[in-house]
Image (spheres, rainbow, N blue to C red):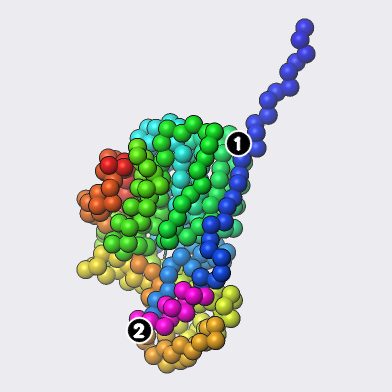
């Protein structure tokens, strides 16, 4: 009788993480430049420090904030069809992966050999990658901390046979770009996906202004805290002296533009210091912190087409609040 062989143990999920963020303090540079403009503005990517990530997770659970729960329901219902659309042997690349909650649903069905989450929030991305490695011990994970609003080249893999690259971009994070910027970003995605590549993208849809206004200005004030945390972060990390009580959260849907605008409004005439510079605020003057574009289905397909993608599949909820769209590199 042969000795019983030791049972092969599943290999620990392989997790590697790279930091592709530029050296030096681009936060300081971007804040000084944004506040020096005649119409003050700050990029939304800086919302996501540890506190901002936690507040964003709370937003996702708000009764008024329909996108996350609606997209999750679409994923639960159609992940099988999405996996069939993307096909086996995918290298799955995700932008703005955050807590990777929706990705779990996709990975269960798609069983990709490689997963590359890309996020500007280092801590959230590492925690999510570790969680996925426990849930999917067979999955090879390489996390990349990067700012994908800038030119970006991802690490290449050798030794793992791949049939196609599939880019997953959920959350309607594409809405944080203007339509013009979105085309530029999708061109980057197209280059990363390469010939034969695919894109699975979550896109929030146009709907009643009352619904949209409430989703970005909730009764519990969590979105307000998320927006104001940007000023608190400037105080913490850049030694700013913003008085948070002298600013208020302002968010509204602009029907003509087809986007939500988020601002921080100065409640008084005041002077704020950041990085040794003085910034004057008039009463009622705002810092524009975010847009969140809402699209019609055909409108978004036409936009993606301009970036070199062909729309193939669309999954929505019954009320047509949100869409997940399947595209291929044309
Ligand atoms: C990051 C795109 C998912 O625009 O809806 C939520 C960020 N801002 N509430 C969005 C956000 C205010 C969010 N996404």
Q: For the magenta stretch, what is the residue range?
A: 28-39
- Does residue 306 appear left or right of residue 136 in this picture? left
Instruction: Determine which quarter of the picture holds residue 260.
Output: bottom left
Q: Earlier in the sequence, mark 2 or mark 1?
A: 2
Residue occupying the point 41% across, 54% down:
171
Disc 2 from disc 1: Cα separation: 52 Å
Q: Which residue is mark 1?
A: 137
**Above-or-below relation of 36 to 107:** below
| Quadrant showing the C terminus | top left
- Secondary structure type for disc 1: loop
Q: Is residue 144 left or right of residue 3?
A: left
Instruction: Tell me where residue 212 appears, x and y as whole percent.
Output: 32, 64
Identify which residue is drawn at 46% across, 74% down. 30
Relative image position of residue 195 (x, y in whole percent): 35, 39
Q: Is residue 224 visible?
A: no
Which numbered dot is residue 92?
A: none
Quarter of the image where ligand 1 sits: bottom left
Asked if the residue under mark 1 is in contact with the one under mark 2, i.e. CB atoms within 8 Å, the reply is no
Dot 2 alpha-carbon crowd within 10 angstroms: few under 14, some 14 to 19, many 20 or more: few
Residue beneath disc 2: 38
Task: Please report the residue visible at 51 percent of the width from the left and 87 percent of the height from the top.
Answer: 277
Measured from the top left, where is residue 145 in percent x and y? Answer: 54, 56
- Residue 129 in view in this figure: yes
In the rendered image, residue 255 lying in the magenta stretch gets the answer: no
Residue 34 included in the magenta stretch of the image? yes
Q: Quadrant of the N terminus?
A: top right
**Residue 84 at what x, y percent from top left?**
37, 32
């Amino acid at each position: 009788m042969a000795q019983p062989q030791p049972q092969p143990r599943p290999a620990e999920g392989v997790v590697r993480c790279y930091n592709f963020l530029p050296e030096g303090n681009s936060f300081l540079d971007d804040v000084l430049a944004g506040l020096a403009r005649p119409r003050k503005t700050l990029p939304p990517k800086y919302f996501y420090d540890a506190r901002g990530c936690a507040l964003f997770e709370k937003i996702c659970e708000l009764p008024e904030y329909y996108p996350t729960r609606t997209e999750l329901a679409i994923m639960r219902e159609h992940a099988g069809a999405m996996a069939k659309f993307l096909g086996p042997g995918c290298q799955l690349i995700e932008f703005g992966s955050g807590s990777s909650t929706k990705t779990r649903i996709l990975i269960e069905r798609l069983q990709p050999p490689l997963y590359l989450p890309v996020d500007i929030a280092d801590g959230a991305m590492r925690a999510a990658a570790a969680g996925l490695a426990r849930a999917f011990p067979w999955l090879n994970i390489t996390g990349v901390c990067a700012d994908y609003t800038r030119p970006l080249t991802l690490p290449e893999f050798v030794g793992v046979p791949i049939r196609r690259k599939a880019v997953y971009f959920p959350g309607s994070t594409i809405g944080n770009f203007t339509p013009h910027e979105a085309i530029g970003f999708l061109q980057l995605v197209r280059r990363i996906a390469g010939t034969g590549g695919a894109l699975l993208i979550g896109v929030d849809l146009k709907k009643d202004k009352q619904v949209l206004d409430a989703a970005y200005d909730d009764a519990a004030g969590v979105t307000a805290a998320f927006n104001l945390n940007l000023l608190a972060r400037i105080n913490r990390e850049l030694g700013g002296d913003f008085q948070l009580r002298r600013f208020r959260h302002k968010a509204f849907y602009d029907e003509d533009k087809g986007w939500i605008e988020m601002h921080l409004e100065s409640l008084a005439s005041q002077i704020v210091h950041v990085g040794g510079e003085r910034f004057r605020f008039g009463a009622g003057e705002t810092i524009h912190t975010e847009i969140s574009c809402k699209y019609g289905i055909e409108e978004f397909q036409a936009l993606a087409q301009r970036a070199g993608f062909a729309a193939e599949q669309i999954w929505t909820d019954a009320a047509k609040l949100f869409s997940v769209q399947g595209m291929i590199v044309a």
